[in-house]
């Protein structure tokens, strides 16, 4: 089957899958058109977590202080005064958590390294006890037949670094740390993600002040923080390639802002694609194109970031894969104005999960994969995060989270559509393996498919864990 016919055949399969998840085929159509809901045989299924959200043990084995340690202990910054001092206690219970993964049948696990466990001051002499801990975790995963995908920065910045992300030197310190870890782990870890969600540790942390360190900077300084973030990524890519063993794959995990066409017609599709490129100009667009596009520089004017020689070449370092954190859509329509598009705001009536920001819009799963593929042509895509917060009441020892299953099933249908149409989506990491410290929401929002009783640290599989296990077992949309 040639490429054109393969793509057209795939579109039929994907559309059928979406129709089924939206309510099913009916009548003679159901009899005449059996639906292929299978994923490719080599598709990777996994779960994801992050160090500060699960590990705890913040004062053990030489770990340094982080920005989130300081922020979470600042009154009024985190719901209920919660902090990550203990979290899920995974630092001590990692073997039990590997058992949860094994019981699910996943072949992959996305985890992050706590930078301050390796370099308590952010740079300088490495802490061997921190290295030893991650060696134990990785060896345990491999012994269980689970491949680790390692994220090197998931927001927990060593507090000792002067100026934090406002300083260009932090980008250089991160590259040194990334190269060091790649040199130590790449004999067993084949996939590294540099940073997680640039928009969150730059904008939410330095523009709106919702996350550590809780700053509200003027536009020029925010743009410079953004630049240091993408520069840190680019320098880290170069450092990993210099220090890692041959064949190591390098990418990024990004929460790209995806603009979804409100109607699938050519004018709205084109508008959505244009909006996605322009609204991510300071992040993924800069990384994939190796430059700040003219629209962004014109919009920011005198507030545009200061760029030094060689910066954009580093930022645009070629990647082996792009990983996407996909949750909520931004709806857009074509418009006669200068931009050619208009964002449609979310309304109070928009369906959402337990987190107010988590608007339910499964189509973003398909359009996110499609837009990145068509805009920049990455070799491989992964979904590094996708999941939902839910209320999760415990009834007779059970957590029947049918709402989370609804969310996942509908998003999976859209991921299946993207795969069936030939876009290079190779794997999926569900957020999250278990309930954990949900940043400024503390422990008030639960994203896990395993319930955590934080008083006892008992892990209880939710109904969604059984559903996901069955998806993995069958390798198909259930």
Image (cartoon, rainbow, N blue to C red):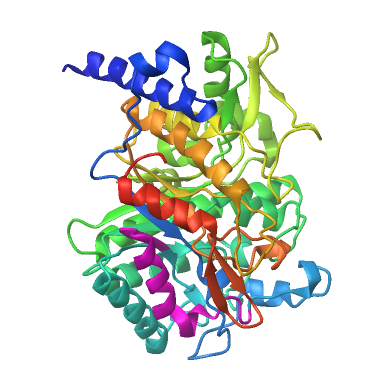
Residue 431 in the image: state x and y as whole percent: 51, 55
Q: Quadrant of residue 6?
A: top left
Give the number of callouts.
0
Residue closer to the observer: 267 or 457: 457
73 and 33: which is toward the camera: 33
Quadrant in which the C terminus is drawn: top left
Determine whether, in the image, residue 311 is placed left or right of residue 390: left
Q: Residue at x 26, y 38 (%)?
A: 40
Q: Quadrant of the N terminus?
A: top left
Res. 327 visible in picture: yes
Give the magenta part as a residue range: 85-110
Residue that sits furthest to the bottom in the current view: 61
Judging depth in this view, the residue of 354 and 326 nearest the camera is 354
Tell me the residue at 59%/65% (across/down). Answer: 435
Q: Is residue 67 above or below residue 468?
A: below
- The picture places residue 250, in percent across and down from the top left corner, at 32, 53
- Residue at point 63% right, 40% down? 304
Judge from the rendering whether residue 234 lies leftward or rightward of residue 184; answer left or right: right
- Picture coordinates of residue 415, whole percent (x, y): 43, 35
Taking depth in this image into account, of 63 and 419 the one nearest to the observer is 419
């Amino acid at each position: 089957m040639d490429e054109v016919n393969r793509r057209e055949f795939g579109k039929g399969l994907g559309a059928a899958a979406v129709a089924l998840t939206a309510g099913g085929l009916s009548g003679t159509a159901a009899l005449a058109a059996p639906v292929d809901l299978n994923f490719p045989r080599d598709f990777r299924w996994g779960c994801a977590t992050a160090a500060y959200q699960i590990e705890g043990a913040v004062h053990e084995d030489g770990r340094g202080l982080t920005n989130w340690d300081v922020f979470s202990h600042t009154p009024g910054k985190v719901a209920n005064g919660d902090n990550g001092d203990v979290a899920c206690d995974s630092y001590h219970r990692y073997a039990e958590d590997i058992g949860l993964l094994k019981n699910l049948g996943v072949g992959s696990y996305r985890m992050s390294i706590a930078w301050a466990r390796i370099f308590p001051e952010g740079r300088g002499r490495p802490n061997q006890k921190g290295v030893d801990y991650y060696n134990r975790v990785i060896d345990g995963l491999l012994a269980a037949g689970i491949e680790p995908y390692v994220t090197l920065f998931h927001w927990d910045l060593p507090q000792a670094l002067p100026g934090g992300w406002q300083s260009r030197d932090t980008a250089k310190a991160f590259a040194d740390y990334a190269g060091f870890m790649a040199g130590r782990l790449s004999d067993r870890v084949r996939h590294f993600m540099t940073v997680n969600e640039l928009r969150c540790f730059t904008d939410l942390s330095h523009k709106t002040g919702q996350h550590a360190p809780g700053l509200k900077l003027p536009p020029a300084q925010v743009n410079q923080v953004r630049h240091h973030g993408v520069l840190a990524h680019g320098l880290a890519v170069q450092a990993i390639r210099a220090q890692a063993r041959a064949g190591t794959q390098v990418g990024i995990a990004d929460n790209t802002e995806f603009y979804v066409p409100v109607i699938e017609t050519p004018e709205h599709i084109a508008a959505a694609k244009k909006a996605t490129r322009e609204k991510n100009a300071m992040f993924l667009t800069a990384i994939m194109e190796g430059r700040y596009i003219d629209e962004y520089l014109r919009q920011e004017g005198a507030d545009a970031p200061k760029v030094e020689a060689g910066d954009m070449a580093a930022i645009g370092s070629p990647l082996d894969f792009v990983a996407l954190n996909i949750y909520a859509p931004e709806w857009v329509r074509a418009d006669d104005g200068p931009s050619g598009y208009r964002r449609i705001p979310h309304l109070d009536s928009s369906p959402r999960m337990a987190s107010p920001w988590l608007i339910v819009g499964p189509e973003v799963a398909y359009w996110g994969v499609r837009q990145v593929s068509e805009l920049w042509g990455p070799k491989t895509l992964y979904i590094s995060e996708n999941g939902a917060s839910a209320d999760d009441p415990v009834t007779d020892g059970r957590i029947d989270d049918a709402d989370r299953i609804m969310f996942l099933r509908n998003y999976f249908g859209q991921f299946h559509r993207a795969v069936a149409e030939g876009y290079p989506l190779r794997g999926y990491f569900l957020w999250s393996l278990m309930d954990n410290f949900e940043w400024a929401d503390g422990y008030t929002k639960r994203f896990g498919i395993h319930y955590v009783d934080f008083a006892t640290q008992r892990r209880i599989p939710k109904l969604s864990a059984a559903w996901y296990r069955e998806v993995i077992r069958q390798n198909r949309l259930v």
